[in-house]
Image (spheres, rainbow, N blue to C red):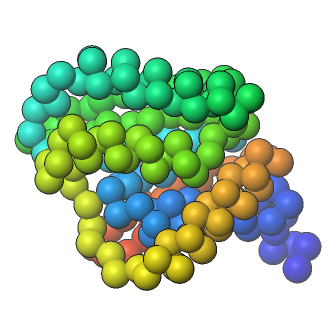
Amino acid sequence: MQGMTSGWGTSLRGLGALIALIVRYPEVSTVQYDPGEAALTVSFLIRGPLEGWEELESGLREMLEAYRALMGDPARRIEFQVTPFEGISVVSLIRDTGTLSVEEIGMAIEVLHDRYDTALLADPHDLMEEELVLQEETIQAGLEALRMGTERNLIALREEGRVVVFNT
């Protein structure tokens, strides 16, 4: 089994975190792990213009910083990027893996839902509540594995109802 996990850190749990994030949160379009930056980028698709984005971004940042302060472990990196395409904007949250928690991703999604409602694109899922909790536990365990390190860039994306993973 050692040969199978070499190059992925101590286990495949980090890869599982990316997959579990996409399965658990249907609003997540892609997740990318950059080991050089020790950062995770979680991207969302929003249809139409991003009215009031600067104010929302500031509020999201303050919320995440306050959460990290309450947890007693300040974030080292909280960034947002917006990439506009024809009729759709890709909103990316970039966080350091050292302090990122699954709760932060859920909070960010709730804020995006509140602001953009149905313009926030999501794949429907039929996971039961117990499965959602299990996915969150898998994500948190995977984030812990990413903190321990992997040397590979990982990208997971949603494509036609499936999760596709690339290692670059």
Q: Nearer the viewer, residue 148 or 166?
A: 148
Instruction: Judge whether residue 19 can be spotted in this image.
Output: no
Q: Residue at x 88, y 79 (%)?
A: 1
Q: Nearer the viewer, residue 136 or 147?
A: 136
Q: How many numbered marks have been drawn onto this rendered protein structure?
A: 0
Q: Residue at x 56, y 25 (%)?
A: 66
Residue 160 % position (x, y): 27, 73
Q: Residue at x 10, y 32 (%)?
A: 49
Q: Is residue 127 above or below residue 157?
A: below
Q: Is residue 81 above or below residue 133?
A: above
Q: Is residue 13 left or right of residue 136?
A: right
- Most extreme residue toward the right, as rendered? 2
Residue 119 % position (x, y): 14, 48
* Residue 99 quadrant: top right
Q: Is residue 158 left or right of residue 116?
A: right
Q: Is residue 93 above or below residue 80?
A: below
* Residue 16 quadrant: bottom right
Residue 84 % position (x, y): 20, 32
Q: Is residue 156 left or right of residue 141?
A: left
Q: Residue at x 81, y 74 (%)?
A: 4
Residue 50 % position (x, y): 16, 30
Q: Nearer the viewer, residue 41 or 129?
A: 129
* Residue 40 quadrant: top right
Q: Is residue 54 left or right of residue 59?
A: left
Instruction: Judge whether residue 114 can be spotted in this image.
Output: yes
